[in-house]
Amino acid sequence: MESTDMLAQERELAQRGFRAIAGVDEVGRGCLFGDVVAAAVILPPDLHLPDVNDSKKLTAKQRERCYEAIIKQAVAWSVSRVGPEEIDRINIRQASRLAMKLAVEALSVKPDHLLIDAETIDLDVPQLAVVHGDARCQSIAAASIVAKVTRDRLCTDEWDRMYPEYGIAIHKGYATKLHRERLLEFGPSPMHRRSFLGKLLDEQLTLF
């Protein structure tokens, strides 16, 4: 099976004169709990990070190692978050796009082109939506890893301590059997996305 050239998109853009190419991705889109987290990463031209791939294909330890390598060698990187109230107000797709926009705006180096995982964002910067970009494009994969590690750390180090009854450190806010059972037992916390709960737990939830 032929391996994917993870630098093909960046190389093509470099040949067209772009120098500060930012990969952009988000994590937490499908969660019932917590923020959606986005990252933007500008890597040096021609830097090859062989272990960097779609964050979902890596173990937690592999992601942590890649995260350290990425932030050490990146020209610039940033992370942004959009919380549950905003997600409920504007819907998850728009919240994800907002988080990605904020991450790009927070970069210390202004990008001249964006590579985004299957999405476009409201910025006047040339951009390309790459389907399955986190598995096909190194800069998007790097953003995926930075966002995933950041959100997982929030789950284990912050949110699980705030709401220990839900098991957030275990399921990271996704709709697992354990999470649904805890929601039935305790009702939603202030950090649960009300628009996601819907009929999931029927009328057994006590909203507050």
Image (cartoon, grey):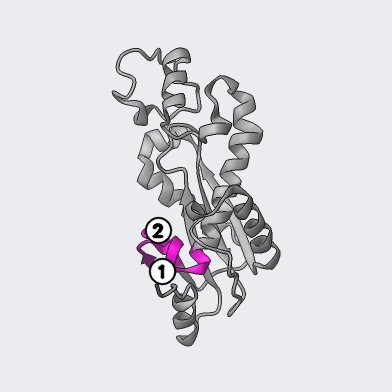
Q: Identify which residue, 114 or 187, lies in the foreground.
A: 187
Q: Is residue 18 magenta?
A: no
Answer above or below: position of 187 versus 19: above
> Is residue 142 in sight in this rendering?
yes
Count of numbered circles on the image: 2
**Residue under label 1:** 127
Q: Is residue 79 left or right of residue 120?
A: right
Q: Identify which residue, 198 or 47, lies in the foreground.
A: 47
In contact (CB < 8 Å): disc 2 and disc 1:
yes
Residue at 42% over, 31% down: 176
Residue at 35% over, 26% down: 197
Residue at 45% over, 78% down: 8
**Residue under label 2:** 121
Picture coordinates of residue 143, whole percent (x, y): 53, 59
Q: Residues within 10 Å of mark 2 (few under 14, many from 20)?
A: many
Picture coordinates of residue 172, whole percent (x, y): 52, 36
